[in-house]
Image: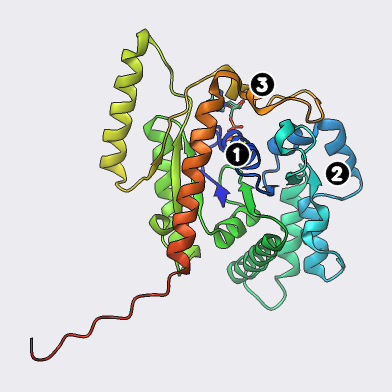
Amino acid sequence: MSAINFKGGTGKTTVAIAIAEGLCHLLKKRVLIIDCDFQCSASITLLGRKALNHLISIDATLDCQLQKLMDGNGRAELSATAVRARNCVREASELMFLLPGNPDMPRRERQILASYLPGRDIHSAYQAASIMIGEIYRSLLDDFDFVLIDCPPGLTLFSEAAIRASDGLIIPTLPNEISFAAIDHLRREIGRTRSDRSLDDLLVGTVISKIRQRNGGEHYRYQTRSIENLLDRVAPGFQILKPYLPYCRELEATTWRDDDGGSISFEHRYGQSSAMIMQLTQAFAMRCDALMARKAKPAQPARLKCPTC
Ligand SMILES: Nc1ncnc2c1ncn2[C@@H]1O[C@H](COP(=O)(O)OP(=O)(O)O)[C@@H](O)[C@H]1O
Ligand SMILES: [Mg+2]
C-alpha cells in the first residue's frame, strides 16, 4: 500500500506511521515502511538522525540497496536492509521495520536510470527501471504482512515504482481544493502507468487531515459538510476513510520524536487521539481486506444471452 499525494505536507508520513503503529498494536501485524522520500521524514522519525546518518554513511539505505540489486552486485534481498523502527511505540517494537531513505536519493535515481539507457530512449528506460523496482518492492511481501510506502510529493522514479507495485493507495489530503486537485493529477499518472487498474480500483481511501475545530464545533461541521460536497462534486467515489483527523498536538508530534527507543506506549504517544487512530486503522484494514478479496476473485465470465429469451 502506498501513502501518496502529489502535494506536499498533506500528512502522508504522519498517516503512514500512525496506521503502521495501529496495525502492529491492534492486529499484531508485521509491518514495513519504505521511505522513498529524499526528505527522509519517516526515517528521521523512526530511527533518529544519528542512527539514520550512520546507515547513510555505510550505504545501508533503500536507494543504495536498490542500485546494488539492479546492477546485479547485491547478493542479499532488499529486506536485508530493513531495520527495526527503534522510535516506534512500545507495542510495535518487535513488529515494525523501516527501509530508510537517503537525501542522496535523487542522484541515485539518476544513476539507476542511466544504467537503463543504453539501447533505450529516456521514456522506455524510465519505464523499465520503475517496473524492475516495483517488482523488487513486491518481493518484500514474503517477509512482512503489510508494506506501506511513504511517497514523496511529486513523481520520482521510486514513487512511480510504488504506484506500479501497489495493491492499494491511501491518499492523505488537506481539507482544501488545491489538495484535492492533486488527486486528479494522480488519477492521470495511474492511467499512464497501470494498464490493469484505475485509481478507483486501487483507492483504499482518502484520509482528510488537519481539520481545525473552532467555534465550539460549528466551524468543524461547516468544514466537513463543505468537504463532502466538494469531494462529491470534483471526484465522486473518493472513499473517505473516517474518522477525519483534526489538527491536533499528538499528530503534529508524530513526526517530531525524541530518541526514545520504543519506550512509549501507543496510548501515551497518541493521547486523546488514540481511539481515533485505532478506528482509522480498523477502517483501513477492513478496506484492505475487501480490496484484496476483490483482487483475488476471478473475473466473472460474461453471461451469455439465451437466444430463446
Ligand atoms: N492532523 C495533524 N495535526 C497537526 N499537525 C499535523 C497533522 N498531520 C500532519 N501534521 C504535521 O504537518 C506536517 C506535514 O505532515 P507530513 O505527514 O510530514 O506531510 P507529508 O508527508 O504529506 O509531506 C508535519 O510537521 C506533521 O507533524
Ligand atoms: Mg512525507
The kind of residue on which mark 1 rests is Leu
Label 3: element kind: helix
Q: Secondary structure at mark 2?
A: helix
Q: Residue at x 70, y 26 (%)?
A: 265
Q: Position of residue 214 (x, y in %)?
A: 39, 11
Q: Is residue 252 above or below residue 229?
A: above
The amino acid type, in three-letter code, at marker 3 is His
Q: Amino acid at mark 2?
A: Ile
Which residue is disc 3 drawn over? 268
Q: CA distance from mark 3 to mark 2?
A: 31 Å
Q: Is residue 308 above or below residue 33?
A: below
Mark in front: 3 vs 2: 3
The secondary structure type at the circle numbered 1 is helix
Q: Is mark 3 within 8 Å of ligand 1?
A: no
Q: Nearer the viewer, residue 122 or 45?
A: 45
Q: Position of residue 158 (x, y in %)?
A: 65, 55
Q: Nearer the viewer, mark 3 or mark 1?
A: 1
The residue sitting at 76% across, 45% down in the picture is 100
Question: Where does label 2 land, which residue?
Answer: 56
Q: CA distance from mark 2 to mark 1?
A: 32 Å
Answer yes or no: do the residues labelled 3 and 2 have beta carbons within 8 Å? Answer: no
* Image quarter in which the C terminus is found: bottom left
In this view, the residue in front, 279 or 59, is 279
- Which residue shows up at 33% across the image and 23% down it? 223
* On screen, residue 120 above or below 34: below
Q: Is residue 24 left or right of residue 299?
A: right
Q: Label 1 belongs to which residue?
A: 26
The crowd level at tag 1 (other Cα within 10 Å; few <14, some 14-19, many 20+) is some
Of the numbered discs 3 and 1, the one sitting upstream in the chain is 1
